[in-house]
């Protein structure tokens, strides 16, 4: 039975919504209170474009939380355990956010877009409300709001050719998470070398929601010679690459240390931040589970699934797999999972109940590819 997603005013549409539908949008989810395209009806072609060519994605659901004012940096320092010393306009940073207990509540990319303005390009949770509450409680001189900004991603090995055709060869010199503000035929944008894949690419942060159709069509025209087509953050590629999906891979007590994000956590910095004492204690205690990969035995999985699949080892619960799929590049079934340290250190297979069948799975490091 086909299940349809009803459209209405309560869930917002992106500036690229109409263009996405014209391009063949076949399925969508809801992310940050917006409709998020998930497929255009041909998953194999969408995967192939990302791996071997170029794909364009409506990722306007990556909402921005703007911190603007004299205390913008002070607020940014308070909400992330990453040391922001050396932050500068034109270079983004991946910044885990934790609550007072040291648990992950988001993992945005931070962009300092002006001397007194910082954006957080967030995953799926209400960080706008969190930041507004903190700013008010701390009586900081900063305005926290959602700006009129909507990213359009261009991803894949040919993405640089498409984007350089639009903006010039300077985009080839951007470092990862590097960005520049620029107009394209009077459309205000930020061009960033980023995106939720390991295939290389860019995100075009549209700064005027009235120009969604115009930007979509310009990217499609620029990429026509390279076989560009529509897609979405790709399920199979994200598992192959071991990318973390906040909310899918995490639960309410996931720590940055379990996710392997230690290098982004600076407990020795002179600046205070939310969750510092808890993170010090969590690090001292060590982790009892870790985000890692699984190679699952058996016939190819019929379709990707982001259900939670329980893992057992030696007859005991050993964690969960949060995304599983058949990988053409690996040539087998793979998954990302939160696995107990006991099972990892044993060096043996775990059991996983998936698609109604008990299978064996080897624990492996990430990424797969």
Image (cartoon, rainbow, N blue to C red):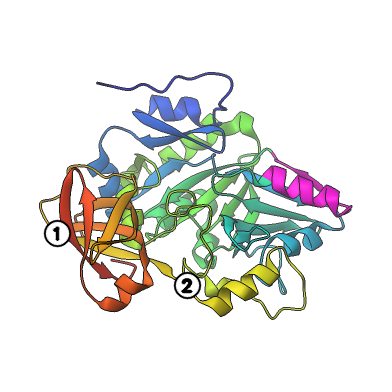
Tell me residue 350's x, y (percent).
Answer: 23, 64
Q: Quadrant of the N terminus?
A: top left
The residue under the point 49% across, 64% down is: 172
Q: Is residue 334 visible?
A: yes
Tell me residue 361's x, y (percent).
Answer: 20, 62
Mark 2 or 1, closer to the camera: 2
Point out the stretch of residues depicted in magenta: 128-147
Query: In the picture shown, does residue 361 fall above or below 66?
Result: below
Numbered label attached to residue 287: 2
Residue topped by disc 1: 297
Mark 1: secondary structure: loop
How dense is the environment of label 1, judged by Cα within 10 Å: few (below 14), some, or many (20 and up)? some
Label 2 or label 1, whichever comes before in sequence order: 2
Q: Is residue 88 left or right of residue 340?
A: right
The residue under the point 24% across, 77% down is: 347
Query: In the picture shown, does residue 74 fall above or below 123?
Result: below
Q: Nearer the viewer, residue 77 or 116?
A: 77
Q: Is residue 169 left or right of residue 49?
A: right
Tell me residue 272's x, y (percent).
Answer: 77, 70
Residue 285 shown in magenta? no
Identify the residue at the far front of this view: 315
Q: Is residue 131 left or right of residue 138?
A: left
- Gap between marks 2 and 1, in whole Å? 27 Å
The residue under the point 47% across, 54% down is: 250
Q: Quadrant of the C terminus?
A: bottom left
Mark 2: secondary structure: loop
Q: Is residue 330 left or right of residue 156?
A: left
Q: Nearer the viewer, residue 353 or 104?
A: 353
């Amino acid at each position: 039975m086909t299940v349809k997603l009803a459209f209405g005013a309560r869930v917002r549409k992106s500036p690229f919504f109409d263009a996405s539908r014209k391009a063949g949008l076949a399925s969508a989810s809801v992310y940050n209170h917006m409709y998020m395209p998930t497929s255009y009806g041909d998953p194999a072609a969408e995967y192939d474009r990302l791996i071997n060519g170029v794909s364009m994605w409506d990722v306007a659901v990556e909402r921005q939380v703007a911190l603007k004012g004299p205390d913008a940096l002070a607020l940014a320092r308070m909400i992330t355990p990453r040391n922001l010393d050396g932050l500068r306009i034109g270079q983004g940073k991946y910044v885990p956010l934790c609550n007072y207990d040291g648990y992950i509540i988001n993992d945005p990319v931070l962009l300092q877009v002006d001397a007194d303005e910082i954006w957080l390009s967030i995953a799926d949770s209400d960080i706008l409300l969190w930041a507004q509450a903190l700013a008010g409680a701390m009586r900081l001189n900063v305005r926290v709001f959602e700006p009129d900004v909507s990213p359009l991603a261009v991803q894949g090995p040919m993405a640089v050719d498409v984007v350089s055709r639009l903006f010039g060869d300077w985009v080839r010199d951007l470092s990862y998470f590097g960005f520049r503000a620029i107009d394209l035929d009077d459309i205000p944008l930020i061009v960033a070398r980023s995106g939720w894949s390991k295939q290389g690419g860019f995100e075009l942060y549209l700064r005027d929601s009235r120009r969604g159709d115009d930007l979509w069509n310009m990217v499609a025209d620029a990429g026509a010679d390279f076989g560009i087509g529509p897609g979405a953050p790709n399920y199979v590629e994200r598992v192959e690459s071991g990318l973390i999906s906040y909310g899918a891979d995490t639960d309410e007590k996931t720590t940055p240390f379990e996710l392997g994000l230690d290098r982004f956590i600076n407990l020795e910095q002179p600046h205070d931040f939310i969750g510092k004492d808890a993170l010090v204690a969590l690090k001292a205690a060590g982790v009892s589970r870790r985000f890692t990969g699984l190679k699952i035995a058996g016939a190819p999985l019929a379709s990707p699934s982001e259900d939670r699949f329980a893992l057992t080892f030696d007859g005991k619960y050993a964690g969960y797999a949060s995304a599983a799929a058949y990988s053409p590049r690996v040539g087998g079934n793979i998954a990302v999972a939160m696995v107990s340290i006991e099972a990892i250190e044993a060096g043996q297979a775990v059991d996983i109940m998936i698609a109604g069948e008990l299978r064996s799975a080897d624990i492996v490091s990430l990424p797969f590819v």
